[in-house]
Amino acid sequence: MRLYDASIRELRYYTSNDPAAWITCPAEAIPAPGRYIAAWSVTDGAAPLSTPLFAAQIAPDGFLAAPPIPSSWEPGAILELRGPLGQGFTLPATARRLALAALAETSTRLLPLIPLALQNDTAVALFSDSQIPDIPSAVEIYPIQDLPEALT
């Protein structure tokens, strides 16, 4: 298991209480969709345990960590990352339709699957009752109550 040095570049708020954090880190530390990285703030003495971070968006120099993150984290904080951990998701190359269902408060953990699907010309529908961040216009958005009908 590898350890990486990282830092918080900025905070973003998708909801009023739960910030997301842009994490600057080496490319090999960026968790793939469905995987996570264990992060520990070197500067936060009140948090002795690591925090699992899932990617909401992926960039070459880091990733946007999906909420929730510790409220004590601020831009400029130094992090130690361990991982990536977990199995992750792989989309079948033959998939032509993808339904993403966000049953939690936020849909941000599902967002890294969208670019992968659109690259393969896969139609994407997102079912969620939470606030939706900026996503490509090719993605159809529905309330979660419409999911059973879509599955048929």
Image (spheres, rainbow, N blue to C red):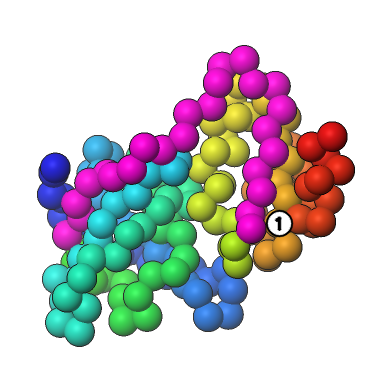
- In-image side of 115 versus 141 (left or right): left
Q: Position of residue 42 (x, y in %)?
A: 14, 71
Query: In what quadrant of the picture does the N terminus appear?
Result: top left
Which quarter of the figure has residue 97?
A: top right
- Counting from the top left corner in percent of width and height, residue 94 is at 62, 15
Q: Residue extending furthest bottom?
A: 46
Q: Residues within 10 Å of mark 1 (few under 14, many from 20)?
A: many
> Can residue 9 be spotted in the picture?
yes
Q: Is residue 82 magenta?
A: yes
Residue at (44, 69) in percent of width and height: 68
What residue do we see at 58% from left, 80% from top? 16
Residue 74 visible in the snapshot: no
Residue 85 drawn in magenta: yes
Q: Amino acid at mark 1?
A: Ser
Residue of label 1: 128
Locate residue 40, reporting x and y percent: 20, 66
Q: Residue at x 55, y 21 (%)?
A: 92
58, above or below 16, in the image: above
Q: Is 9 rendered above or below residue 54?
A: below
Q: Which residues are magenta?
A: 80-103
Q: Is residue 112 left or right of residue 64?
A: right
Of 38 and 73, the residue lying toward us: 38
The residue lying at 55 percent from left, 56 percent from top is 108
